[in-house]
Image (tube, coloured by chain):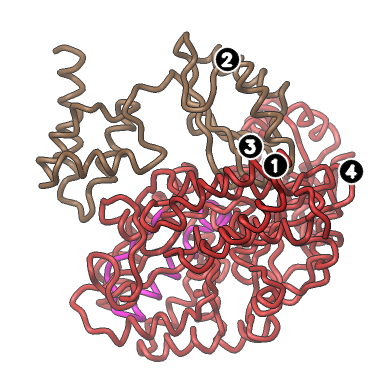
Amino acid sequence: MTESGTMQATVQEIIAALKDKPGALLPILHGIQDALGYIPADSVPDIATALSLSRAEVHGVISFYHYFRDTPPGQQTIHLCRAESCQAMGGKQLEEHVKSKLGIDFHETTADGKFSLEPVYCLGNCACSPAMQIGKDIYGRVTADSFDAIITNTEASA
Amino acid sequence: MSITIYVPCDSSAVSLGADRVANAIVQEAAKRGIDINLIRNGSRGMYWLEPLVEVATGTGRVAYGPVQPGDVPGLFDASFTEGGAHTLGLGLTEELDYFKKQQRLTFARIGKTDPVSLTDYIANDGYRGLKNALEMTQEQIVQAVTDSGLRGRGGAAFPTGIKWKTVLSTASLQKYIICNADEGDSGTFSDRMVMEGDPFVLIEGMTIAGLAVDATQGYIYLRIEYPHAYEVLNAAIATAYKEGYLGDNIQGSGKSFNLEVRLGAGAYVCGEETSLMESLEGKRGLVRFKPPLPAISGLFGQPTVVNNVISLASVPVILDKGGDYYRDFGMGRSRGTLPVQLAGNIKRPGLVELGFGLTLRELLYDFGGGSASGRPIKAVQVGGPLGAYLPEAQFDTPLDYEAFAAIWAVVGHGGIVVFDDTVNMAEMARYSMEFCKIESCGKCTPCRIGSTRGVEVMDDIINGRNLDKNIPLLRDLCDTLLNGSLCALGGMTPYPVLSALNHFPEDFGVNA
């Protein structure tokens, strides 16, 4: 099966498993993004048909939520907190360092495809600010040095 | 005999290396042939001491912290498994001042128990509230919650008992309980600590709510930023089903309550209850007009209780010990306890649960120990990104909904973010507008457009352009947001903006 064929089969499987839940759209979108890393544009018509929605409605939901993405992410997504508590502990300086170290801005992916950088507004790790999340791993009291060490380790284990 | 050692699984503790410490302890114990029983507990909430390792001894649990993996061999050398002396030794955990001075009702078990152990939960007074509730009428349950004086801990402080009573008295074939676990406020983490550290207390609280109002389906709307809480909640829910604490015949009573966790997708506005329900229904999180109230026409148009995690997690102790017991904590019309979260630039960040009435100064200095940087505290933001900034002159305000309202501030969800004197308050005001712009659902004009114009006017002010014109313009814009927005996002963004301007005009380039 081709790559896009496999993806389509995955999408169909997820839709079939979840479509009868009340309010099924978000669970389906999460399912697809968990499996594929993003929600491919060509999955929108299938979702719309299964839920008796218009394609515009499905697209509208995808674009409303910051977490959903319609392009493939890098191998690792770094969520860097921009909220007040992290700002109070040097979050802005850390943000500058992270952007220059990776050579990208928020919502971008490094040229080698290794990292995507996304802002996040609070990870609930405010007692250990500044904070970030890579995949599901959370880091606290992040400094420029510890950030460099963390991404070196992440690259090595990827 | 096996020695019991506790290393928290709380995600903040993990963010500081708790998993690596736990592994190091297991490996070192194996190497030395010492038989240990490692329990991953919740956090005690003393985050400057995390990872906080505890050892059970004959005299109680002895604490060591903050522990890093490299400290582990030395701890074994010092016989920490018997409570031996070490430079990281802190003595008995529950004798630590920060912990001892608290009044932990909602957080009674957190940090003590294994979060996903139902046996541990029941052995530590869990499910006593539900047991009582199963023997009470619905009216009696609602009355107990009303008597407790509990007000919504999400921020709006609406009396929980009245909300429940409305849902109970609205006839419908299907009603819902929604737990708002979209804890998006910066500086808050008490919901996360409950879900990660004592998930059964939330499940029990929601089950009691379901019994009280005749709702057989519950949803926990959890933010995507909390993946660890998602796992812990699902594990606890599976156990509760297996042991007959959820499902169609709760503890043989014939009563039903089903519960599912649903994930948000990174939209702050979905913490607003009507937006949250739209999201649960699978739509864009657009705020709804009120009325109708969710209690009358909520999720899928049915009567719905929407309560915050802390509100629901406070219900079991109320049903266990009585509304009067809970009501006897606190001051004025703010009854019971509030889990305060100290965050940002503070020496001893963490969770402090106490009856309402403590002053900010006591929290910031007696508990918090002043700023982490050692510089003077310039401002604190209480109640999340929509809460006012307070200057030192207001630090004697007691934590009380009405006392805060009187100084045009909010208690909100009890988060306190501390800033030292290096902060520029005009920059923070700009950030508040920017945050509103990013998170606005777009339904009402004041919020959607006002926030964008707010960023622009703040840029002008920060660059010193035309202050005579732009300061009044900012005030005018805030007036429109305050009075014209559909929900608290646009409606409360003026709190941080105007409080920053009023208390710190020099940062805006104007005289007081």
- Helix, strand or loop at disc 1? loop
> Is residue B306 magenta-colored?
no
Residue at the farthest top position:
A112
Give whichever of B121, A20 is nearer the camera.
A20
In the rendering, which numbered label is found on residue B240? none
Q: Residue at x 29, y 45 (%)?
A: A26
Report, in whole angstroms, how far the alpha carbon at label 4 lies from the one at label 3: 33 Å
Residues under numbered marks 2 and 3 in contact, where contact means CB atoms less than 8 Å apart: no
- Earlier along the polypeptide chain: callout 2 or callout 3? 2
The residue wearing badge 3 is A131
Residue A103 is situated, as x and y percent measured from the top left of the image, at 57, 15
Which chain is red in the rendering?
Answer: B
Give whichever of A62, B169 is nearer the camera.
A62
In the image, residue B507 above or below residue B76: below
Residue type at mark 3?
A: Ala
What stretch of residues is rendered in magenta? B193-221
Chain ID, mark 3 = A
Chain ID, mark 2 = A
Which of the two discs, 4 and 2, sits closer to the camera? 2
Report, in whole angstroms, how far the alpha carbon at label 4 lies from the one at label 2: 48 Å
Q: Residues within 10 Å of mark 2 (few under 14, many from 20)?
A: few
Residues under numbered marks 4 and 1 in contact, where contact means CB atoms less than 8 Å apart: no
Give whichever of B350, B447 is nearer the camera.
B447
The residue wearing badge 1 is B465
Which of the two discs, 2 and 3, sits closer to the camera? 2
Q: Colour of chain A?
A: brown
Residue type at mark 1?
A: Arg
Q: Quadrant of residue A38?
A: top left
Drawn side of residue B376 relative to residue B447, left or right:
right
